[in-house]
Amino acid sequence: MPFQALNRTLPGLSDYLKNLSTLTNSEDLWQALRRLLLAHAPSGGANLLGGIGDDIALLADGLGLRDRVRTHLGSTGNMIIWLGAEKAADVVIVSHMDRPSFRVQSLDDGALYPISANRFPMGDYRVTAKAVRFERGRLLVSAAGVLVSHRTDTSSTLHFEAKHGKLGWQDTILLDVNPVCSGGHVMGNGLDNCLGVLTTLLAAAALKSIESSLVTQDRRCLFVFTDQEEGPPDAFFGHGAARLTHALPPPTYGCIVVDAHTAGPGLTPQLSGGASHGLASSWGRGSIVPPNFQSLAVELAAGMNETHPGTVQINSCYLSRSDDMILSQWTRILGLIGPPMTDPHTGYEAARLSDIQNSVWWLTYFVAATLNLVPELTPRYALGR
């Protein structure tokens, strides 16, 4: 029912998605993703000149969103795209743009400490990496080399071996694996969370096609690309999201968090299964989605999967916390959405282009539903409460 009701009220939405070349053309989609994967995205500096924020703004420009981008939201370190009426937001969609990062502990031996979750495999692991610093007004690569991880049940050490350039105290270390795509299968690093960023960007472009409906019904949505989501799981993380809560009033309805979801054996999300839609994070230690928005997701998914099989999979298993943990203290979390991927925070992350395409369809329709644009859905899902 929700899918059909949305199509009746917003008939142009489906047509736009079917004709958006960046979404429908696999090569165009890959080139957009590759651009993001190659960008510098140090946690704490992703939105500096020379960082991934520049690439997000350029992609937004190519999608017709140039005049809707605010590259800096005050001192939050975040950037936003806005759509709709000139008022406070009704729904905020958040996707983090920073990546797992490491800082220098000792220059003598290149020892590092993580400022994100260390998910490297047990034993010895080596992966190509780069050292990034802010110099002459922008982010630059100061050294290229290899990050060496050694993990046991009782200890963990990290080192950077410079092959070119020289490591400095002020550097941030990032993985630097050349991304590849073959037959729609992508491998590399940075899919967490370039998958979420690209999904959010393309959904924003699609929803701009129905902006007249947003203005007519006095609705506004914001797409926020946050910094410093990555952090140690045993300490505070989501700093960019935390600053966002002081920069904007709480949205009318709530917030949707778009971050890649881990897929694989024993987990609900699987590659090639479409978007993953979560209802709680960390078994409730993070955020939980209210029952009415759970019902909306389940019934909308049923309608979309019937018409477009494999659009979305409801994630009923363990889902890591993201920016939702802090944002749930500011407003309700309406949904936890992301393309599935395997092996996050490693140099062999993997995903499928088709899952990005399906995630854009799903996020676009779910945002439209949560914006309460279809009167017949309001009482059925208590969207005004």
Image: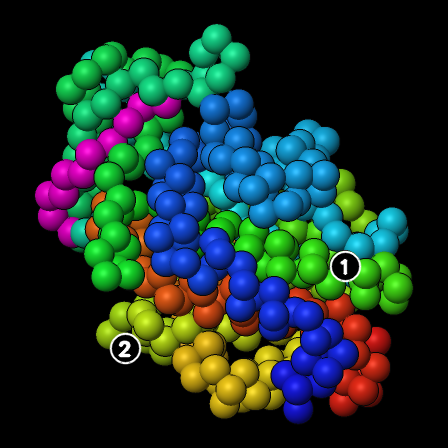
Mark 1 and mark 2: Cα distance apart in space: 41 Å
Q: Is residue 309 visible?
A: yes
- Residue visible at 54% across and 36% down? 58
Q: Decide whether residue 131 is among the magenta residues.
A: yes
- Residue visible at 54% across and 25% down? 48
Q: Is residue 185 left or right of residue 85?
A: left
Depth check: 40 or 248 in front? Answer: 40
In the rendered structure, find residue 211 and report the number of the disc placed on it: 1
Residue sticking out furthest to the left = 124
The vertical placement of 78 against 137, above or below, is below
Q: Label 2: which residue?
A: 266
Depth check: 311 or 175 in front? Answer: 311
Q: Helix or strand or loop: what does disc 2 sit on?
A: loop
Depth check: 231 or 58 in front? Answer: 58
- Residue visible at 37% across and 23% down? 132
The location of residue 151, given as percent across then percent down, is 17, 45
Which amino acid does the dot numbered 1 rest on?
Answer: Glu
Q: Which portion, as a residue range, is magenta?
A: 122-132
The location of residue 270, given as percent across then percent down, is 32, 73
Which amino acid does the dot numbered 2 rest on?
Answer: Gly
Image quarter where the N terminus lies is bottom right
Most common secondary structure along the magenta stretch: strand
